Image: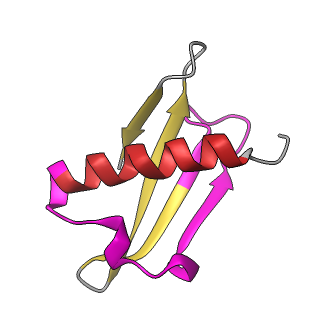
Amino acid sequence: MEPISEDLRERMLAAVEEWAAKRYQARLKDVPAEQITITPASSDSEYDYLVGLDSLVGSAPLRVKVAVGQDGSLQISD
């Protein structure tokens, strides 16, 4: 998988922030940048990227799965 573009990274973070606000009443700006990771998922996975949020929900790390649709839409789940 090729490196993630800055545009896709920004779109993913915005979508994850919206999702986290609805699901956990949390904001990404409360998470230090060094504690947010975006890594490609394995090729046999049903999603494309894992977004790691190391301090969003209490002290437990959260891994959010992001699938990128053919139309560029983002589907998020945990």
Q: Residue furthest top?
A: 71
Across and down, in percent, residue 22 comes to 16, 49
Q: In this view, does 2 lie above or below 67?
A: below
The quarter of the rendered structure image containing the N terminus is top right
Coloration mode:
secondary structure
| Image side of residue 54 versus residue 42, left or right | left
Was residue 46 drawn as part of the magenta stretch in this picture?
yes
- Labels in figure, total: 0
Q: Is residue 43 above or below residue 10?
A: above
Q: Is residue 15 above or below residue 60?
A: above
| Residue located at (55% from left, 36% from top) | 47
Q: Is residue 5 above or below residue 34?
A: above
| Residue located at (61% from left, 36% from top) | 45
| Residue located at (61% from left, 49% from top) | 9
| Image side of residue 1 versus residue 32, left or right | right
Across and down, in percent, residue 66 comes to 50, 41
| Residue located at (55% from left, 53% from top) | 50
Across and down, in percent, residue 58 comes to 23, 82
Q: Residue furthest bottom?
A: 59
Across and down, in percent, residue 21 comes to 20, 55
| Image side of residue 63 versus residue 9, left or right | left
What range of the chain is rendered magenta? 22-50
Was residue 7 drawn as part of the magenta stretch in this picture?
no
